[in-house]
Amino acid sequence: MNAILVTGAAGFIGSHVSEMLLKRGEHVIGYDNLDPYYDPRIKRHNLNALGDSLNFTFIEGDIRDAEKLNHVTKTQKIDRIVHLAALANVRVSINRAADFTAVNVGGTVNVLEAARAVNAAHVVIASTSSVYGETNRIPFTEDDPAINPLAPYPATKRATELMSHAFHNLFHLPITALRFFNVYGPRGRPDMTPYKWTQAILNGEPITLFNKGNMKRDWTFVDDTAKGVVAALDHPNGFGIYNLGRGEPVLMSDFVQIIEEITGKSAIIQETEAPASDPSVTYADITLARKTFGYDPQVSIADGLQKFWEWFRLANG
Ligand SMILES: NC(=O)c1ccc[n+]([C@@H]2O[C@H](COP(=O)([O-])OP(=O)(O)OC[C@H]3O[C@@H](n4cnc5c(N)ncnc54)[C@H](O)[C@@H]3O)[C@@H](O)[C@H]2O)c1
């Protein structure tokens, strides 16, 4: 049976996508270098959550290692690829532009080359809402030129979209790039706002709120994102770029309030101006993904944060 390569399978979104694919009986090869940017023990936990399915094989490897990637795709009967491995934090990228470029751009080119070598039936790659920068076209639509990234991270992700187009044009590889919007939920990354704020509020430590909370983010629950990835994988469509958000941006001041209500504790708020790397709004128009592969996000921010909280309490004893 052919298998699906999931790069970044030990990460937050990758573990959910792998779980969903395994549940419907697919063979999944997870490929991840357990990058130490955040604690690799968390990534091992994520892998454990996939259970001991005989249909899952984990290979510890780096996407910068082209030879290893090629060996894996050739020997493991890979016919589809979900490429999620990346360095993925906007503010961290400010002082690590070279690392972000090597992993996100160089690594993605290696994935595309490996896909080309096995004539893959479909490659789905992760992009980000940050490619839109501080656009005045709101909600964000995929035909926005997205040529004004605010930091290295979105610049590398836009570069991977453009490189994917080149590979599609030259080698007819079916490739779909998905722009994820502020994904959160169980197994959420410890460097992202939901985790950081929940932890700080519980510990009685201050949280940093930009622009008096007057910023909006289109938070998307991870099950909705993972369903979107799998639906996109099932619909190869030449080359395409799609927003995978919820389409209902939330004011960050409201976001804090929901966490306060769920935890039953008040936040200590430190207000500052937003850094130049952070746009004031993210807001997805999801019409195209809905029409093309039936993307249909279901989970409201209140329900999603409640589910996140239930996981967080268990995970942190
Ligand atoms: N979480 C979000 O809100 C969000 C939003 C937009 C885009 N994305 C994108 O979605 C994808 C998954 O993000 P996530 O939130 O699950 O992040 P994550 O950091 O939890 O997962 C990324 C995984 O990639 C692995 N990785 C990093 N460098 C690697 C390398 N050189 N070789 C092999 N593996 C490597 C990491 O070890 C990690 O397990 C990323 O491409 C990210 O840019 C995420």
Image (cartoon, rainbow, N blue to C red):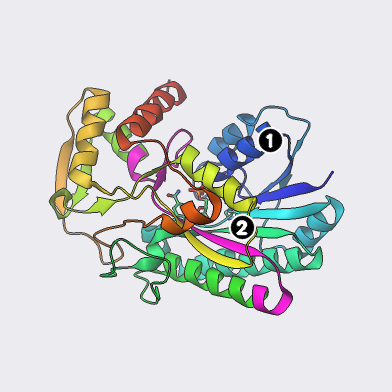
User: Outermost residue, front direction?
Assistant: 291
> Looking at the image, which residue is at 15% across and 41% down?
269
Looking at the rendered structure, which numbered label has been put on residue 179? none
Viewer-side residue, 58 vs 216: 216
Q: Is residue 176 above or below residue 1?
A: below
Q: Is residue 138 above or below residue 296?
A: below
Q: Is residue 28 visible?
A: yes
> Looking at the image, which residue is at 37% across and 47% down?
246
Element assignment for label 1 = helix
What residue is disc 1 on? Answer: 22
What residue is disc 2 on? Answer: 124
Q: Residues within 10 Å of mark 1 (few under 14, many from 20)?
A: some
Q: Is residue 245 left or right of residue 74?
A: left
The magenta span reads 168-194
User: Mark 2: is the Cβ under 8 angstroms from ligand 1?
Assistant: no
Q: Quadrant of the C terminus?
A: top left
Q: Is residue 148 left or right of residue 290?
A: left
Specify whether residue 45 is painted magenta.
Answer: no
Residue 142 location, quadrant: bottom left
Q: Amino acid at mark 1?
A: Leu
Q: Amino acid at mark 2?
A: Val
